[in-house]
Amino acid sequence: MILKQDVLDVVSEYDKRSITVGVLGSHSALDVCDGARDEGLPNLVVCQKGRDGLYTNYFKGRTMNGLEKGLVDETIVLNKFDEILTENVQEQLVKKNTLFIPNRSFVVYSGIRRVENEFRLPLVGTRDMLKIEDRETEKENYYWVSQQAGIPIPKHYVSKDDIDTLVMVKLHHKYMTLERGFFTAASPEEFDAKVERLLDREIITTEALNDARIEQYIIGPVFNFNFFYSPIDDEIELLGIDFRFESNLDGLVRIPAEQQLELPAKYRDPLMTIVGHANASLRESLLERVYLMAERFVAFSKRHYSAPIIGPFCLQTIVDQNMDFYVYDIATRIGGGTNVHTNVGAPYGNSLLRTRMSSGRRLALEIKRAIALDQVDKIVT
Ligand SMILES: Nc1ncnc2c1ncn2[C@@H]1O[C@H](COP(=O)(O)OP(=O)(O)OP(=O)(O)O)[C@@H](O)[C@H]1O
Ligand SMILES: [Mg+2]
């Protein structure tokens, strides 16, 4: 593991008057760049060839006939995302005094072990907490963290034979490796029948089934809470709430029941491939409960990791009919849904900070404050 001290050694050589905000070109990079722009910090996006158009073209910063457009200052275009780990690219980033914002794409495309052991750039985030998102491979994953922290999660079923209520079975899709072949079942018999069908349709594999997570299906709306923990102030801030659009599920539920039953069989298995997000608010009387979960999460991070969770994190929740929250996933970095608040700001963040405040902007603001207060050591690992 690259230690905080290793990173502080890198930062000590930085020219603090010319810091660059770096990010991998995917996921929430637009929000990060937009926020850096708002705070007057130059940004740099590391792209993969063929997936670079947003950053090298459409949102590239430029002046057109006197009109200022765009928000990306600089790009590095690589053949493959994981070339960001090469000595050459890391050196370029260090030369530009880059503080790097980890997003989920960065971790997935680089591989968690390489992020931990080979990427020596200062991360504005908590390096040894990124792994908790890998629920299949890490023992100390977010389920474990939630239990340790005292955060409620959906009941876990160790064996399909114990299924006594509606459950969700979480496993990888056979072909779409980053996507899911999730299904629901209400009994061991239904589980077996669905497994047979999904194997047959080549949506899942028996190997993936062995690593599947079976958990209680919570019936209720889904809210992603985009929080920010400021290590400088030692305070938790709720910035905004989003929820997801998922394909093909969202289309299926908009078809009346009779017509759903008439659909050809191959369209009837719902997939939950994420395609977008929308802005949400939460009933005011419930908000404090969500802060309580965030407080517990931050308190646990202080106890167990090399640094408390630094900056943005996201609690992904479902609320049942008793108004009880269940956390089904935790993002230990900027959430994927924060683009919904890009530039307009996140409702609660705007209110709290008395100006437009997206997750990206809040990150840049914390960087600026850390530099001004000479506390950069508090915001990097
Ligand atoms: N226990 C549950 N009960 C009901 N719905 C659930 C439950 N867990 C997850 N979901 C639904 O499934 C979706 C995906 O779940 P989850 O985040 O666990 O998958 P994932 O593989 O981590 O996907 P991603 O990487 O996109 O977050 C959620 O957005 C939510 O709508
Ligand atoms: Mg998830």
Image: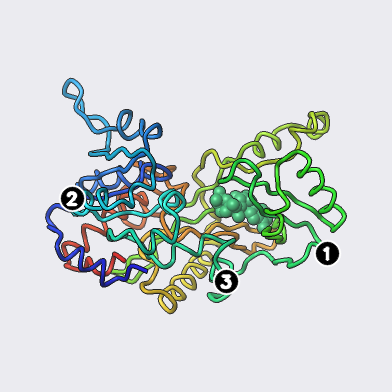
**Which comes before the other along the chain, label 2 or label 1?**
2
Amino acid type indicated by mark 2: Lys
- Label 3 or label 2, whichever comes before in sequence order: 2
Compared with 364, 51 (above or below) is above
Above or below, comparing residue 56 to residue 361 in the picture: above
User: Between tags 3 and 2, which lies in front?
Assistant: 2
Q: Residues within 10 Å of mark 1 (few under 14, many from 20)?
A: few
Q: Position of residue 64 (x, y in %)?
A: 20, 23
Left or right, 264 with reference to 252: right
> Which amino acid does the dot numbered 3 rest on?
Trp
Q: Which disc is residue 321 wearing?
A: none
Q: Position of residue 379 (x, y in %)?
A: 29, 65
Q: Which residue is mark 2?
A: 96
Q: Is residue 356 visible?
A: yes
Looking at the rendered structure, the number of numbered marks drawn on it comes to 3
Q: Quadrant of the N terminus?
A: bottom left
- Farthest bottom residue in view: 303
How far, Cα to Cα, is label 3 from label 1?
23 Å
Q: Residue 372's x, y, as percent?
A: 16, 62
Mark 1 belongs to which amino acid?
Asp
Q: Nearer the viewer, residue 287 or 217?
A: 217
Q: Is residue 105 toward the left or the right of residue 145 in the image?
A: left
Spot the residue most to the right.
Answer: 189
Q: In this image, 204 relative to 265: left or right?
A: left
Say which residue appears at 29% left-offset and 47% top-offset: 35
- As helix, strand or loop, the secondary structure at mark 1 comes to helix
Front one among 291 and 138:
138
Q: Which quadrant is home to the C terminus?
A: bottom left
Label ID, residue 144? 3
Q: Is residue 103 left or right of residue 254?
A: left
